[in-house]
Amino acid sequence: MNRETTFTAAFTRALRGGACSVVGLDPGPAAVPTARWTADADDDDREILDLCHGPTLDIGCGPGRMAEELAVRGQVVLGIDVVAEAVHQTIRRGASALRRDVFGTVPAEGRWHTALLADGNIGIGGDPEALLRRTGALLTERGRIVVEVAEPGVPARAVWAMLECEGQRSRPFRWAVVGTDDIGRLAAPAGFGLDLLRRIGQRWCAVLVREPA
């Protein structure tokens, strides 16, 4: 029987090498790809990061491979994550990071040129419209959101999900899935339009920019 734990505790175990699955997003458990997240940025990651212009806020930075790559390029970048272990691993990679909730206080609000939502982080909080609206408040007037989305044909949905890691199951947390078919529609109420939609390897990435007033 799985013992209940917090999301933070389960994700920390995963980042430290524990086998971890997410339950609730798909019909069955899906492995959390922490090995890829803790590795160096790959060619697809770098192509996504080419879309990040100027000072960039990496929302839900995880163990920091994207923030590290931007820092190596000489860009100003800050990773934020609610899990302390993720922040510590990002800092060990040489990138700046803070333990922050995107819906809480974030440094340099209104001055970021790009907000990055990679690895499905459009799902944070289970309400993409609210997340995009909040992210917009963190950006300059000409700022952009670079968001990784699911492939065509995947319907937008919000679910209660859980992490299972080494015999422990996290308490349910709200998460959303957004694909290429719905990102433009969901961005509109937050004042953003779809500027670019690109397939990068087996992944899909959208660039959102503010609609003219």
Image (tube, helix red, strand yellow):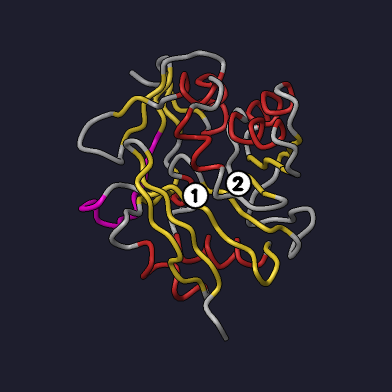
- Secondary element at tag 2: strand
Seen at 65% across and 26% down, the residue is 85
Q: Position of residue 193 (x, y in %)?
A: 46, 71
Seen at 67% across and 49% down, the residue is 56
Q: Residues within 10 Å of mark 1 (few under 14, many from 20)?
A: many
Q: Which residue is mark 2?
A: 59
Horizontal side of residue 95 vs 184, given as left or right: right
Q: Position of residue 43 (x, y in %)?
A: 47, 30
In front here: 202 or 139? 202
Q: Which residue is mark 1?
A: 124
Horizontal side of residue 167 vs 37, given as left or right: left
Quadrant of the snapshot with the C terminus: bottom right
In front here: 135 or 104? 135
Seen at 74% across and 56% down, the residue is 105
- Secondary element at tag 1: loop
Q: Which quadrant of the view contains residue 61?
A: top right
Q: Label 2 vs label 1: CA separation? A: 9 Å
Q: Are marks 2 and 1 in contact (CB under 8 Å)?
A: yes
Looking at the picture, which amino acid does disc 2 mark? Ile
Horizontal side of residue 125 vs 106, given as left or right: left
Q: Which quadrant of the view contains residue 194?
A: bottom left
Q: Earlier in the sequence, mark 2 or mark 1?
A: 2
Q: Which residues are magenta?
A: 152-162
Looking at the picture, which amino acid does disc 1 mark? Ile
